[in-house]
């Protein structure tokens, strides 16, 4: 299963989009506000200059006995004007107060109009001119839409660019993750390509050195195991022969030596099994075990394994024909049933189907914290499942399952028993 840094890639892409989006939004909003202020200030400046001139012209109509003549003159010039007393309420009180002090006053209305005016020199009446700013608002709306569209486009481009950069940046991380997973699965020859002299290149070199050291160490350990097993085989064979002879003459041994003799025979048998298992482990590690598939009828095959060893186990299921290596399958199934008989001790059942072989027992079960380590070599869960075994049986079963192309799983509940399932790599034909 490949390990892809999907979450980190998404986080980097999102971060890139956020930076680009926030920066662009700040620039767009700032630009819009600057343009808006410039346009409104320019409009007000032009209007103020015009009103100042109009107030000087209005002074010629003093005294204002005929206001209509004054207003008519402004209308003829195309301006919208009105006269207002300071307390008339035609403009806001703040605007009227500023105009009463002899200054140019202004206010803007909700319908996009600018009202600018002041007090006519030498009179108490205030003159106000109305200017339309709808065009300014239309221009600002177009600018706002253009900036919003540009922002959306930049965010989309940032997402595409960020995704591409994140993928290229994290590609070495993905390769390293896959390489680490391969090493964890036993592919010790896995190495990373060293590309460039950046941090990833240094990382790849460090990983390769670590993998080489690990491969060399494991190779030494495997060779040591093979050498020990090989050196022990000859003396253990002699011990087994002597123990067999001793077992045949147990009745002739004095009573006080009878029990020690029995223990000696049992320990020699255990030692022989351990040496055999060490030899098999060394062959599996060395890749010297081959797989030769043959047509088998599963139910009969498993029944024969149970009967040949005299185990009390119930075998049921579907008589499914499959193509598997009988020697590897026998080793796997025998180890699983032996484990159930030895540790489960009661109600051992084997169910055979077209897709799996399940071995269950009603023993004390296994604590959850031990389940991930059951297929490790020499691992024993606890005293309840310690027994006389070497701790290699399930590891050998797991290696044989891998050689056959299947998978081996375990589930257990303390006090309720355990279930080992070998998932077959073939289907019924």
Image (tube, grey):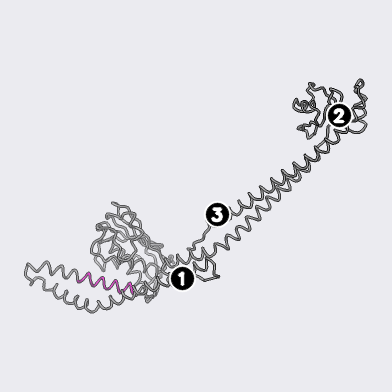
Q: Are marks 2 and 1 in contact (CB under 8 Å)?
A: no
Does residue 197 show up?
yes
The numbered disc on residue 11 is 3
Q: Which residue is mark 1?
A: 208
Label 1 sits on a secondary structure element that is helix
**Residue 184 is drawn in which quadrant?**
bottom left
Does 269 sit left or right of 293 as displayed? left
Residue 130 image point, x, y percent: 83, 32
* Precedes in sequence: disc 2 or disc 3: 3
**Local crowd size for mark 3, using a 10 Å CA cut-off: few (<14), some (14–19), many (≥20):** few
**Local crowd size for mark 1, using a 10 Å CA cut-off: few (<14), some (14–19), many (≥20):** some
Residue 15 image point, x, y percent: 58, 53
**Residue 100 is drawn in which quadrant?**
top right
What residue is drawn where x is 88% and y is 33%?
53
Q: Is residue 274 magenta?
A: yes
Q: Is residue 190 magenta?
A: no
Q: How many marks?
A: 3
Residue 350 image point, x, y percent: 32, 60
Q: Which residue is mark 2?
A: 81
What residue is drawn where x is 68% and y is 49%?
27
- How far apart are the two marked residues, 2 and 1, measured between alpha carbons? 87 Å
Q: Main secondary structure of the magenta part?
A: helix
Does 216 sit left or right of 273 as displayed? right
Q: In the depicted view, which residue is nearer to us: 90 or 41?
A: 41
- How far apart are the two marked residues, 1 and 3, measured between alpha carbons? 28 Å
> Does 352 sit above or below residue 101?
below
Label 2 sits on a secondary structure element that is strand
């Amino acid at each position: 299963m490949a390990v892809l840094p999907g979450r980190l890639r998404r986080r980097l892409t999102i971060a890139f989009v956020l930076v680009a989006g926030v920066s662009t939004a700040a620039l767009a909003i700032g630009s819009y506000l600057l343009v808006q202020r410039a346009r409104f200030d320019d409009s007000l400046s032009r209007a103020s200059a015009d009103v100042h001139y109009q107030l000087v012209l209005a002074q010629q109509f003093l005294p204002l006995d005929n206001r209509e003549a004054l207003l008519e003159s402004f209308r003829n010039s195309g301006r919208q004007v009105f006269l207002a007393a300071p307390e008339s309420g035609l403009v806001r009180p703040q605007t009227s107060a500023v105009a009463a002090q002899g200054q140019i006053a202004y206010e803007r209305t909700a319908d996009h109009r600018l009202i600018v005016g002041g007090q006519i020199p030498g009179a108490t009446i205030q003159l106000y001119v109305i200017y339309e700013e709808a065009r300014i608002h239309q221009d600002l709306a177009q600018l706002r839409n253009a900036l919003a569209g540009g922002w959306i486009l930049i965010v989309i481009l940032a997402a595409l660019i960020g995704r591409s950069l994140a993928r290229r940046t994290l590609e070495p991380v993905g390769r390293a993750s896959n390489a680490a997973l391969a090493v964890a699965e036993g592919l010790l020859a896995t190495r990373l390509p060293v590309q460039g002299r950046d941090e990833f290149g240094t990382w790849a070199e460090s990983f390769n050195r670590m993998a080489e050291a690990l491969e060399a160490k494991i190779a030494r350990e495997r060779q040591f195991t093979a050498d020990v097993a090989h050196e022990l085989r000859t003396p253990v064979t002699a011990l087994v022969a002597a123990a067999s002879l001793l077992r045949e003459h147990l009745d002739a041994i004095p009573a006080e030596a009878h029990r020690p003799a029995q223990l000696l025979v049992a320990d020699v048998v255990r030692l022989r099994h351990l040496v055999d298992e060490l030899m098999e482990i060394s062959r599996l590690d060395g890749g010297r075990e081959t797989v030769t598939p043959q047509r088998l009828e599963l139910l009969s095959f498993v029944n024969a394994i149970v009967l040949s060893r005299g185990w009390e186990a119930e075998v049921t299921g579907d008589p499914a024909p499959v193509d598997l290596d009988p020697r590897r399958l026998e080793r796997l199934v025998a180890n699983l049933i032996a484990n159930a008989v030895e540790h489960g001790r009661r109600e051992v059942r084997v169910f055979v189907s077209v897709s799996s072989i399940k071995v269950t027992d009603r023993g004390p079960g296994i604590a959850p914290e031990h389940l991930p380590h059951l297929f490790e070599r020499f691992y024993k869960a606890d005293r309840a499942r310690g027994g006389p075994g070497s701790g290699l049986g399930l590891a050998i079963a797991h290696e044989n399952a891998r050689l056959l192309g299947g998978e081996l799983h375990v589930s257990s509940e303390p006090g309720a028993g355990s279930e080992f399932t070998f998932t077959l790599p073939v289907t019924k034909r």
